[in-house]
Amino acid sequence: MTPDALSARHRAAESFAREAGRLAIALRADPRGLEVTLKGPQDVVTTADGAVERSIVAALSAAFPDDTFLAEEGGGTAGDRCWVIDPIDGTANFARGLPHWCVTIAFVAAGRTEVGVIYDPNGDLLYSARRGMGARRNAVPIRVSVTDDPARAYVDIGYSRRTGIDDFARIMTRLLERGVNVTQGGSAALGLARVADGRLDGYAERHLYAWDALAGLLLVEEAGGRVNAFLEGSGLTKGNETMAATPALYAVLANALEVR
Ligand code: LIP
């Protein structure tokens, strides 16, 4: 793809992510209320997720009619030029009015993430990365933290019912035994964005879908962090393990998840 074609998609992702965030806030505030349902054990979805996703897909497909889409609610097919969209990442928080959720949009070309955008409408923070061109928060360059000591590290470890409780307990135990401070925010994308801007030192989760992870992983990589090869194998369509951290702490996460 030409640099111009990627720049056009980068700008579009930024403006459509902002618009989508504002729509989600408006739907959340709508007195007619949100319909909240479960699509699996503790896997929450609201009427806003679908509405916001349709608005993003409509805008992007009007701008780039030959591109394909893979989105959390509507699914899709992963072509050579593919938009990967999670309209509301952290839906469980969103449904409860907890301000820890975001809009996340990634663009994958020829099997590689080229653009990643995460918009946090609660903080009005636009995280944005383009491969090879660094990462920014509200247009200001960001870097991962310099933390290298596990006893000073603060990481976010995600969990879903797609993976085993014992496995999660072992991961937490290994990290706590290393002296690491652990939190669980409930939004993988926002957790990864906060690793990219240095406010957290790492994020890991046994299984995430591409729409949860890709934009955040590119942000961390472009901010000088180390990430796993999420798109290896069938990562784009089936999801994968997710690990992202400062270069010095990556091995601590990999050890906790027992992966190379
Ligand atoms: C969520 C992720 C979270 C994970 C949840 C879910 P959603 O995304 O952000 O890290 O633990 O299972 O996948 O469903 O809110 O878009």
Image (tube, rainbow, N blue to C red):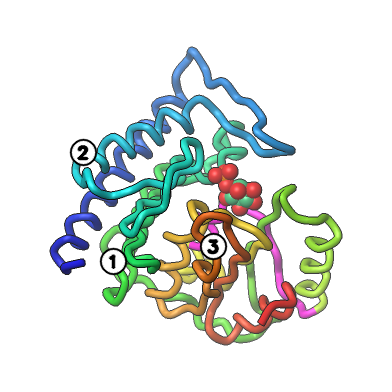
**What residue lies at 24% left-to-right and 57% top-to-bottom?**
10
Report x, y in % for residue 36. 60, 25
- Mark 3 and mark 2 lie on one chain; the one further toward the N terminus is 2
Up/down of 212 relative to 76, above or below: below
Residue ID for mark 2: 62
Does residue 197 show up? Answer: no
Q: Which residue is outermost to the right?
A: 166
Q: CA distance from mark 1 to mark 2?
A: 29 Å
State which region is magenta. Answer: 178-192
User: Dot 2: few (<14), some (14–19), or many (≥20) neighbours within 10 Å?
Assistant: few
Which callout, 1 or 2, points to the residue nearer the camera?
2
Q: What residue is shown with label 1?
A: 140
Q: Is mark 1 within 8 Å of ligand 1?
A: no
Q: Secondary structure at mark 3?
A: helix
Residue at x-position 75% and y-position 55%:
163
Q: Quadrant of the C terminus?
A: bottom right
From the viewer's perspective, tell me whether residue 229 is left or right of residue 16: right
Q: Residue tagged by mark 3?
A: 235
Task: Identify the residue at image location x=61%, y=82%.
Answer: 249
At mark 2, the secondary structure is helix
The amino acid type found where label 2 is placed reads Ala
Q: Decide which of 81, 185 is in the foreground and name it.
A: 81
> Of the residues under marks 1 and 2, which one precedes in the sequence?
2
Label 3 vs label 2: CA separation?
Answer: 27 Å
138 vs 29: above or below? below
For label 3, being within 8 Å of ligand 1 is answered no
Q: Position of residue 110 (x, y in %)?
A: 34, 67
Q: Residue drawn 49% across and 59% down?
A: 236
